[in-house]
Image (cartoon, rainbow, N blue to C red):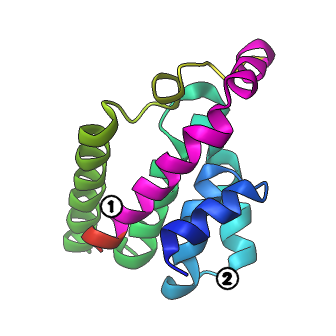
């Protein structure tokens, strides 16, 4: 099964967008599934504030796992990581017009009313799975 489909399945099983994206890459870069799920949990729904899309955040974490700086003086690793994060954001934005959750889904899920509105509109069934798959596909291309 391809990663985009795996991530969509994780999302439909009840994990958030960030968890779904990070988890399908985590073990390749030395992070156990359980720890990936825990780590990414707080990033879904734009950190529950409608900020950066959780799928994009999960992809950024995967980039960090593969290329991130682990020695203070390793500015080359930092620069490569930053460049890939920027490329991810540019490509995601070119597909969807923004990287902000509230703008992508048209609701502010940081409020109970906004969350209910998103559920009623079918956002979590129609829009979010596509965003998860797109983040995974872009990540596969740039890694």
| Numbered badge on residue 96 | none
Q: Examine the image and state in which quarter residue 36 appears.
A: bottom right
Residue 34: percent from left, percent from top? 75, 75
User: Is residue 49 depicted above or below 5 in this figure?
Assistant: above
Residue positioned 35% across, 72% down in the render: 140
Q: Are marks 2 and 1 in contact (CB under 8 Å)?
A: no
Q: Secondary structure at mark 1?
A: helix
Secondary element at tag 2: loop
- Residue 126 on image: x %, y %: 59, 39
Q: Nearer the viewer, residue 34 or 9?
A: 9
Point out the stretch of residues depicted in magenta.
112-139
At x 51% / y 53%, what residue is drawn?
Answer: 132
Residue 33 against residue 61 in the figure, above or below: below
Cα–Cα gap, marks 2 and 1: 22 Å
Residue at x-position 22% and y-position 54%:
87
On whether residue 62 falls in the magenta region, the answer is: no
Residue 41 rendering spot, x and y as whole percentages:
71, 53
Residue 44 seen by the camera: yes
Q: Which residue is mark 2?
A: 32
Density class for disc 2 (Cα within 10 Å; few <14, some 14-19, many ≥20) is few
Q: Nearer the viewer, residue 23 or 14?
A: 14
Residue 47 in sight from this viewpoint: no
Left or right for 112, reference 69: right
Q: Is residue 114 left or right of residue 106?
A: right
The residue pinned by badge 1 equals 138
């Amino acid at each position: 099964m391809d990663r985009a489909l795996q991530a969509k399945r994780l999302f439909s099983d009840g994990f958030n967008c960030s968890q779904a994206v990070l988890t399908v890459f985590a073990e390749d870069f030395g992070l156990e599934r359980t720890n990936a799920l825990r780590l990414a949990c707080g990033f879904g729904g734009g950190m529950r504030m409608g900020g950066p899309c959780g799928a994009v955040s999960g992809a950024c974490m995967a980039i960090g796992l593969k290329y991130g700086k682990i020695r203070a003086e390793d500015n080359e690793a930092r620069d490569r990581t930053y460049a890939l994060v920027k490329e991810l954001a540019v490509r995601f934005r070119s597909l969807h017009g923004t990287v902000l959750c509230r703008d992508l889904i048209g609701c502010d899920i940081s409020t109970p009313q906004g969350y209910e509105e998103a559920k009623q509109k079918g956002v979590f069934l129609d829009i979010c799975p596509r965003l998860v798959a797109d983040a995974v596909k872009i990540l596969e291309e740039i890694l």
